Image: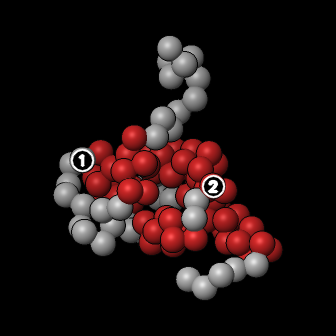
Amino acid sequence: MAETSPIDREARLRRLRFRAWHRGIKEMDLILGHFADEALETLSEAEVDQFESLIEVEDTTLYNWVTGRENVPSQHDTALLARIRTFQHMKGPLWQR
């Protein structure tokens, strides 16, 4: 994607954050939504492109990739997906131990 203005980037990130929290299955809302809240602002443009590409993947398939139930196709097997897979998605007393 070409260089974007700060306003365009902000709008894009807001749209992606909304889409991350409004998937089809709650598990993916929690996984992608928490990740978007914590990391989206710090991603490079290339990583934002990768995140946007992952958002387009069907929920069950993406969930299976994240949980390791299915192999990830090479086009989606990125460092960003690895970060999502290892990200502590839930906050609260159990995760703070």
Q: What's the residue at 30%, 72% (across, down)?
A: 75
Q: In the visual, does 78 lie left or right of 39?
A: left
State how many labels appear. 2
> At which x and y percent is residue 27?
44, 45
Q: Is mark 1 on a helix, strand or loop?
A: loop
Residue 11 visible somewhere in the drawing: no
* Vertical comparison of 76 with 70: above or below: below
Q: In the visual, does 73 lie left or right of 6?
A: left
* Vertical comparison of 89 with 63: above or below: above
Residue 93 visible somewhere in the drawing: yes
Camera-near label (1 vs 2) is 2
In the picture as drawn, the residue positioned furthest to the top comes out as 97
* Vertical comparison of 3 with 76: above or below: below
The type of residue carrying mark 1 is Gly
- Mark 1 → mark 2, Cα distance in angstroms: 25 Å
Residue neighbourhood size for the residue with mark 1, other residues' Cα within 10 Å, grouped as few (<14), some (14–19), many (≥20): few
Q: Is mark 2 on a helix, strand or loop?
A: helix
Q: What's the residue at 51%, 71% (across, down)?
A: 46
Residue 94 numbered mark, or none: none
> At which x and y percent is residue 10?
74, 68
Residue neighbourhood size for the residue with mark 2, other residues' Cα within 10 Å, grouped as few (<14), some (14–19), many (≥20): few
- Give the position of the N terminus as an image quadrant: bottom right
The type of residue carrying mark 2 is Thr
Q: Name the residue under label 2.
A: 42
The answer to which quarter of the image holds residue 80 is bottom left
> At which x and y percent is residue 42?
63, 55
Q: Earlier in the sequence, mark 1 or mark 2?
A: 2
In the picture as drawn, the residue positioned furthest to the right comes out as 7
Q: What's the residue at 36%, 50% (across, down)?
A: 82
Q: Mark 1 points at which residue?
A: 68
The structure's colour scheme is: secondary structure
